[in-house]
Every structure is written in C-alpha cells, then in structure tokens.
Amino acid sequence: MDALLVLLAVPLAGGLSLWILGERDSAPEINAAFSFTTFAAAAWLTEDVVSTGPVSGFYEQFFVDPLNVFLVALTAFVGLTTSLFSRPYMRTERDKGRMTPARLRLYHSMYQLFMFTMLLALTTNNMGILWVAMEAATLTTVLLVSVYRTAASLEAAWKYFILCGVGIAQALFGTILLYFAAERVLGPQGDALLWTHLDIVKHQLEPAIMSLAFVFLLVGYGTKVGLVPLHNWLPDAHAEGPTPISAVLSGLLLNVALYSVIRCKVLAEGALDSRFAGNMMMGFGLLSTVAAAFFLSRQRDIKRMFAYSSIEHMGLTTFAFGMGGPIANFAGLLHMTVHSLVKSAIFFAVGHAAQKAGTQVMEDIRGLLRVSPRVGWGLMIGTLAILGMPPFGVFASEFLILTTAMREHAWATPLLLLALGVAFAAIFSRVQPMVFGETTLRPLPYQPALVPVFVHLGLGLMLGLYIPPYLAAWYQQAARLLG
Amino acid sequence: MSFEGVFAQLAAAVAALVLGPLLTGWVNQWRAWLQNRSAPPLLQPFRTLHKLFWKESVMAHEASPLYRLAPYVVFSCMLLASMIIPTLSTNLPLAPAADAIALVGLFALARLFISLAAMDVGTAFGTLGARREMLVGFLAEPAFLMVLFTASLITNSTSLATIVASLSHRSLAIVPSLAFAGVAFTMVSLAENARVPVDNPATHLELTMIHEALLLEYSGRHLALLEWAASLKLFAYSCAGLAIFFPWGVAQANDRTALLFSLPVLVAKLAAGGIGLAVIETILAKMRIFRVPEFLATAFLLGVLALLVHLLLGA
Amino acid sequence: MTPIHVQLVNLFAAGMLLLSFAMLSQRRILALIHLYALQGLALTASTVAVAWATGQHHLYWSAAINFTLKVIVLPWILHRLIRRLSVKWDVETLINIPSMMLVGIVLVVFAFNLALPISEFSRSIARSTLGIALACVLLSFLMMITRSKAVPQVIGFLSMENGLFFAATSATYGMPMVVELGIALDVLVGMVILGVFLFQIREQFDSLDIHHLEKLKED
C-alpha cells in the first residue's frame, strides 16, 4: 500500500516541482532523481507483490497483481534509464539551439507527469480511471511531440492529438457499454467498473453487449497500440518528437495500451465463451505485423523506420495474446519486456547518431564506428537484437510465438515469417552502411550516455539466454491470469 | 355516395375556388402592411382574373396543342388536389382515391405540363424557368413525401381522410417527429409555391424568376387559369399542412352540424396561416439559386429525421 | 399516453440530433460555437429530466458539471481562442453540403440499427435514446473528417464527447461520479492544451488551414 502511494505520488510531485523549478541548469539531474525514486518505489512494490501476492488499495480502486507489477517495474526502469539518457542529449539539443529553457521546463515536467499517468493506468482497478489515465497520457505528450516547433512536428502532434483522441473516444464508448453490461449484474454503484469484481462475474455479463463493447475497446485502445489501420499517427509522432520521448512512447506507452486491451480481453473472453475476442486480436495483430514490415522498407528517416518496427512488434505481441494459452501468453509478456528494453536502447543510440550527423535521414549518416565506436556498436547490436537474432530475448519470444502459431494456427505462420523476413532485410540493409564505412562526422560536445544502451541490451541478452526462475515463475503466473 | 358526402365534396370545390384567390389577396395585403406600404384591396385577385378572362389570348405561331392544353390540365389538377384534401370534412366520395401519394402525383403532373408548355414556344426564359422549376420540384417532392410518410406512419394509413381523422383524435403530447415534419413541410411549401426565400412572386427581373418565367408567354384566359391554379396550389398546400398539423375542426363523417362550423374554422386557420406566411416572407431574404438545393436538402433531411425519430422513439 | 418525463427526454434527444445535423451543415465558426453550447444545454436538460424522473441525485451533480463545463467554460475558451486567433471565416467543407446531409442520414440509420438490440437490455427510462446518442457521435465524427480548418475539427471532437455522455446517460444512469469527474478534467485539460497548440500552429503557418498539416507522407 505504501509502496503504491509513493510510486504514484513521486512522479506527480516531480511533475509539479519541475514545472516550478524547471528552467534551472540542474533540471535534468532533478528529473533523473525523481525517476530514480520512482524506480525504487516500483522495486519495493514488486518485492511486495512477489512475496505476498496481489496488493489492493484505496477501497479497491488500485490493484497490483503479477501481470501489471512487472509492467510497473519495467516502466519505472525504462523511465529511469531514459531520464539518464536525456541528460546529455537535451544539453546537446539546447546548445544547438533547438531547445530553449522554457521548452526544457515543459519537457521535464511533462515527462514526470507522463510517468505518473502511465503508472496510474497500470495500477488502477477502475476501468473508467484507466480510460482517464490513457487520455491523460496522450495529453501530456502532445505538446512534447511538437516541442521543436517545426512544420513536420506540428503536423505530427496534430495527427497524434486528433487520431488518438478519436480512438480514445471509441474506447470511452466501449467503457460505457462495459459499465452497462456490468451494471446489470453488479448494480449501479461505482464498484461495477472495478476489474477485480468484473473478473469474478465475467461469465454473467451479457454476450451481445460485451462483444460490441470489446470491439469498441479494441479499436479505441488499439489505436494507441498502433494497430494497422489505426496506426497513422504513430510513425509521425515517434519520429518528430525529441528522442527520449520517442523512446518512452515506443517502449512504454504502447505496452500500457496493450495492457488495457488484454485486461478487456480477459473480461470479454469470459463473457463470450467463444474465440471472438482472441480472433479479433489475432486479425489486427497479423495485419499490423505484415503491413508494418512492408511500410518499413520504404522509409528514409531512421526514427520513422524504427517506429514502424514498433508497430510490427506490437502487432506480433497482439497476435500472441490473441492466440492465448500459457505459452503464447508467456511469449507475449516476454516480448513486451524485451521489445521495450531493446527498442529504447536503439532509440538512445539513434538519438546520438542523429545528433552527430545533424539529420535523421539514413542515407546521410555514415561511419558511426569511426567517430564514436560505442554509439556505432550500440546501434548495430540493438538492431540485431530487435531483428530477432539469437541469443537475444526477442529471438526467444518470437520463436515461442512462431512455434505456437505453427501448432495451432498454421495458416498464419508463413505470413509472420514473411513479415519478419522483410523487416530483417529492410532494417539490416539500412543500418549496416550507417555503422560501417567512412565518415566526416565529428564527436559530440557532451559525452553520450551509452550506459543505458548497453544496460538495456545486456538485459535483453540475459532474458534470451537465461530467464531467472523467479522471473519465469512470475511470467507464468501472469500468463495464467490471462487465461 | 351519401348526400352529405357529395354535398361536402361540392362545398369543398366551391370553397377552394373562392378561398384560393382570397388567400393570395390576404397574403399580399399583409406583406404590404408589414413592409409599410399601402395594400391592394382584398378582392384584387378576383378583379385580375375577371380582367384576364375578358382579354384576348395571344399565342405564338409555333405553339403546339400542348401549349393550349396545359392551362386546363394544370387548373384541373390543382382543383382536384384541393378537393381530395380534407379541408371541410373527411367524408368525401373521392376519399378512396385521396391517397397521400396520389396528391404528390397530381402536383407532379401539373408541374410536368407547365414545364413542357414553357419550353414549348422555344424562348430562352421559358426554358430557364422550366429547368429551375424541375430543379426545385426534384428536390422538394421527396421531402414532401417524407413528411406525408411520417404522418402515415403515425396514423398507419396513407389515406388523407384517415390521417386527419386519427390525428385530430390524438391527445395533446409533445411529438418531436411531427415538429420536425412541420418545419420540413413549411420549407417545402415555401419552395413549391414560389415564395421567398426560394423565389419572389412579385419579381419583375426575368433572371431571378422561377415560377413567373413559366407564365411569361401566356395571356388572356390561359393566364387567368394559370394564376387561379397558382392560388389553388397555395390553398391546397396550406390545407394539407393544416390537415396534418392542426386537424381540429374538420368535420368527421356523419356529422352534419359540424359541416357548418368547419367553414369558419377553416377560414380562421387560413387567415392565421396567411399572416404567418407574410411574416416569413418579410423576414427572410431571397436565396441565391445555388443555395436552393441546400435549403431543400435540409427540408428532406428534416423529413427523414422525423421519420427516423418516430421509428426509434415511437413519438 | 407516455409519461411526461419520457416525452421530455425524447424531445431533448431529438433536439440533440437536430443540433448535430445543424453543426454538420453550418458554415460560420461563431454559429458553430453557439450550436455546441446549445447542444450542451440540451444534454444538461435531458440529464435533469432523467434525474427528476428517477430520483437519482448524482445525476443532478453531473448535470451541474456538464452545464458549467460545456455551456459556460468551453464555449468561453473557444470564443477567446477565435478572437485571439482572428478566426472568423466561413468555412467551406470538403464535400458539398447536400451530399454530406445524405451521408449523415445513412450514418443515423446505421447507428439506430446498431443500437436497437442493445437498448432492449437497458432498464433506464431513456433507453430508446441510445440510438440517437450513437448517431450524434457518428455525425460529429463525420464533421471532423470533412472540415478543413482546425477549430471546426475541434468542435466536432467536443461534440463527439457530448454524444458519448448522452449515451452514458441513456444506457445507464450515468457513469460513476469519479469517472465523470475524470472525464471532465480530461476534456478541460485537452482544451487548454489545444489552445496552446493552435497558437503554435498559427505561428508556424500563419494559418489554421489543415491542408498545411498534410505534408508528412510516406516517401
């Protein structure tokens, strides 16, 4: 309970205090300090849940079970490493003139508030508050996407605001329908939207209403996950914002949105007694994977390319959760974790590379290994990791997903393999000339923060080679919760 | 074919012939007063008709038999339409034929003949008027049909007599579908009767004419018949509106004494309606012809909305 | 003879649908804002009618929040925004108005069809208005995608939220208070952020035409 309180209070307080203090030179360090405290609270909460079981608080308005506690820990961890990365990165940006002190203040305070909204969304038990938190997460990042005030970033932020807003409105309708179905069974008090209560009575929920509600919820939250054809905002928003924001959007917000979808899927599957919910998720997931792989191959901007790669991986994870069953769920959870870690590592490396070269267009970035070996190797290894090379974690989860698909839904396997293959070829052929070769780039003024990159990649490697037993048990518990 | 029925039918025909031009005169008087002008006398339209009947009818050499026939056809259509709308009584021998759709069909027939006749002589303004009339009619007819269908759905019949009978017996309630239908009907009748905001009946500028352009070539008794037909059309539309939205006071079947009262009630309702029309014409300005499709699309929309709201809410 | 409160709710529901169509066909931004305020008023009135008929007191509170936010605060923010941005154009729509009306009617029929099986499950007195609520949402969605200037798109977005709130009131007796407060807060914060954002757009492009924001394409 106390861990939960600290976990939520710290980023909220951080946001507010950085708004007041933000124009100081030490703002990045203050930001990192708040993130560290959040991470400590998350670790404390994780230890609580792992040892004593699910935690519930504030008249059951919050609920932390093995499923969301690992996401909480992941969010806090990546939040911490991103804040460490953003210290030298933002300082370089400020020196280049692309960030003013006023914008930095906005950036830092919104960063902490964004963390707060994501943690709120992950830990709340109330489906209505989940919606509010998801919408708030969009709102906190809209102004950050447009922070450079270029034409492209304004367009990206406008698309992000409008498209995600419309999507979230669909999700609100879905939540209303869910409440409608729940009220008939649980009565018209506020308890009717609590996930724990709904989970107990899910077989009594009216199937007609629940199927419609799930469709709206999938479309609504799916827009935020970046499922094709609702993905239009994602490449622009992830590419045009500052790199730390791209890293947290790709690595964290997509996970939180997918978490919302799976919570709803558990309820829908319980009410419908058919594979409708799972099939819909599989359909969208497969479509996203294949479409993203093909879109990927036409990109010229490196961040857009990796944003499409995020769509592809999220599609794959959605597909896994759609399949259901212990192995697929385990693989999905593992994939969410390693994708977060590796994708944010890639974005860190890409950020530094783009800063060096002064551009995000891939053809203009060359020879990273010569000017800064660590950035170059970070990018190379990260790319290999995200493409599913063994022994990294992504290989393990993709392998599990593919074998489950082969066993249960063989028709999907060739499509998945095709998508993964196309993505591999496209990304690798673009990244390789960027890393090797001659260059005229100069080193950066501030020492690039590459520790986060290698820490993430190391964790990804570890999860691929050897998952510690407590972690495996944890994932299995979470997988079982998903049915 | 009872005696009351035949009597009521004839009375309706005579009332239409007399009250039609009277209504037009009334509206013109009020328009003048609202615009701070001195008004023509109430019986002016009768004088105009009288004058025209005595004048010689001049026609072009190329005019076909259609040209001569059209005024008679139009006049008969309008008279027949006025006779089948339950103005004084619902006990009409023609009631079996008095379908809402037949009513729309009669108006369409009249419109067809007058447009063809306008194009017959081959002048530019005749064709212009005919095309504009067809444009307005093409969009106004579906809207009018939607209004009638709403009324039919509420009363479960398309026969006008039945509609009036059941609507006048409903208890007072807020009925959104009838409210929407009423607004739609007002818009449609403004368009069909060539009133502001769609067309200015007193215009002398050929380029802005719709209805007047159709009559430009006619003279003498033909023009008299067409003018009378126009006032009958206004009368018919007003009575249709009154029958659907304010059906109280119309004599029901087998009610002899009510027939005596129905005439004063009708006159009173028409007088009020005429004042309302004059007020609308004074307040609104004439629209550009390009905006007329939007105006009528809105009317159609309101008609469909009335239908849908009735289907969904049952109200 | 249906009871008076059901008639009132039906009347306000029909009014909301009419207002959605009116917003769809309206050309002037100032008139759009007034129509949006009127829609908020119709929504509040229908919530009060339901509250009075069923004695659910929390609905009075939610009607009060609605009234303050949607009839007073948001139109005032929008007024200020368009005054400071000097935005008073007549907006042309992407497809002409009669066709848009026809598409709107098709959407309304679709929404009514979709809502019919669900409204049978509702125990609320306003259950038949769920179809109208869904129709309002779809019509505001149509308005958003056929407008080419920023402010009408935003008003369409807000009107969508009105429709959703109306759906909540008609299917169930409103959402739990804490959720409604959260939604209201989100809407308010969203508007504030939007205001800031529109200034940024105007600063960059000297115009709020959405066509300027269509340059990022696949290459």
Image (cartoon, coloured by chain):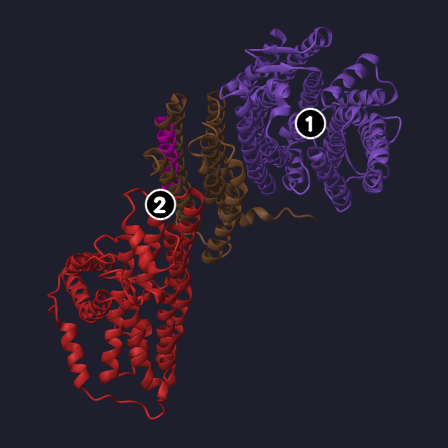
Query: Residue A48 has which mark?
Result: none
Query: Residue A255 has which mark?
Result: 1
Residue in view at x 55 percent, y 48 percent: C212
In this view, the residue in front, A394 or B192, is B192
Region rendered in magenta: C33-52
The chain coloured brown is: C
The chain coloured red is: B
Q: Are marks 2 and 1 on the same chain?
A: no
Q: Nearer the viewer, mark 2 or mark 1?
A: 2
Q: Residues within 10 Å of mark 2 (few under 14, many from 20)?
A: many
Q: Secondary structure at mark 1?
A: helix
Which kind of residue does numbered mark 1 sit on? Asn
Residue A349 appears left or right of B61: right
Label the magenta part by its dominant secondary structure: helix
The chain coloured purple is: A
Residue A237 coordinates in the image, percent (x, y): 63, 37
The image quarter in which residue B143 lies: bottom left
Q: Is residue A336 above or below residue A54?
A: below
User: Visible in this render: residue A299?
Assistant: no
> Would you name the residue on which mark 2 appears?
B176
Q: Chain of mark 1?
A: A
User: Where, quadrant-wise, is the C terminus of chain B in this rendering?
Assistant: top left
Residue B109 coordinates in the image, percent (x, y): 38, 73
Residue B28 shown in magenta: no
Residue in view at x 76 percent, y 21 percent: A479
Residue A90 coordinates in the image, percent (x, y): 65, 26
